[in-house]
Structure formats: C-alpha cells, structure tokens
Image: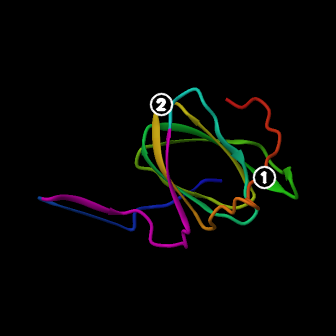
C-alpha cells in the first residue's frame, strides 16, 4: 500500500548530483518531521488527502491497512523504508510510522490540514510496535 516513486532523472558530474524525486501531484502543505526511536507516529487515515513522504535519513517500519467505510478491509502490511525512499500513501489507508533509528523526513499533503475540520480518522489497531 506504499506507492514507491522512482527517480524521474539522475544527473551526476564533477560538481555532485541532482535527483528528480517527484514530478507529479499537487502538494498543498509540506512539513519536516523528525522522530526518535521508541515512538509511534500516524495511526490514522485520510478520506481525501494523498500524502507524499521523502525519507531523508533513518529507518522506519510503516504499517498500512486499507479502510472501507471506517473499517479495516484487509491485513496489516509491514514495510521498511530508509533514507532516500520516496513514496505516496493514498486516501483510505491507515498508516503507522515506527522509527527504528532516529529519522527525518519530508511530508507533503495534497490538501492542507483544516484545523476546524481535519481529514484525520482513527481506527483501533492491535499489537502496534
């Protein structure tokens, strides 16, 4: 349920390199997140918001589960991401981030968070961690 994004170009010369990370989507809010180990982030889903993640450093276990009408509809999937990975989590996918090493990432959302009516929903997830 993580939709990994391939680099759309890579150029290297004597000055260094430049990598095209993503050239699609409409990102309306961008955040920088840092996390230590031993914590849980996320554990929610969105009904209409796509989320882009660009992992800058660290290693994170990401648990995902599809949601339909507020209920889980399949098994929890376990993914491991690390610095350099780029992926998108689509709406109606519960996602939980568990950093295994101190981690830093950029998070971009297709819809800005409305503090009065946030597109955040929670379900009960057993055995997180």
Q: Which mark is residue 38?
A: none
Q: Residue at x 80, y 32 (%)?
A: 126
Magenta residues?
15-34
Asked if residue 67 is positioned above or below residue 22 in the image, the reply reads: above
Q: Magenta stretch containing residue 113, yes or no?
A: no
Q: Residues within 10 Å of mark 1 (few under 14, many from 20)?
A: few
Q: Secondary structure at mark 2?
A: loop
Please tell me which residue is depicted at 45% across the width and 43% down the height of the picture: 104
Decide if residue 77 is on the left or right side of residue 17.
right
Picture quadrant of residue 110: bottom right
Q: Secondary structure at mark 1?
A: loop
Q: Nearer the viewer, mark 1 or mark 2?
A: 1
Query: From this viewpoint, which residue is outermost toward the front?
Result: 116
The stretch drawn in magenta includes residue 16 = yes
Neighbour tally class for label 2: few under 14, some 14-19, many 20 plus, Cα within 10 Å: some
Residue at left offset 51%, top offset 31%: 36
Q: Nearer the viewer, residue 77 or 126?
A: 126
Q: Quadrant of the C terminus?
A: top right
- Visual colour scheme: rainbow
- Across and down, in percent, residue 69 comes to 88, 58
Going from N to C along the chain, the mark reached first, 1 or 2, is 2
Q: Which residue is mark 1?
A: 121
x 40%, y 49%: residue: 84
Return the x and y of residue 54 as percentages of the image width and height.
Answer: 47, 53
Residue labelled with disc 2 = 101
């Amino acid at each position: 349920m993580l939709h990994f994004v391939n680099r759309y170009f890579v150029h290297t010369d004597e000055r260094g390199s430049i990598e095209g990370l993503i050239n699609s989507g409409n990102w309306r809010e961008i955040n920088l997140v840092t996390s230590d180990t031993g914590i849980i982030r996320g554990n929610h889903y969105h009904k209409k918001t796509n989320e882009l993640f660009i992992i800058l450093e660290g290693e994170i276990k990401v648990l995902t589960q599809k949601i339909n009408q507020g209920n889980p509809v399949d098994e929890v999937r376990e993914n491991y991401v690390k610095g350099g990975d780029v992926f998108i989590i689509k709406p109606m996918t519960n996602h939980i981030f568990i950093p295994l090493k101190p981690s830093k990432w950029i998070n971009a959302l297709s819809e800005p968070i409305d503090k009065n009516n946030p597109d955040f929903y929670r379900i009960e997830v057993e055995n997180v961690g």
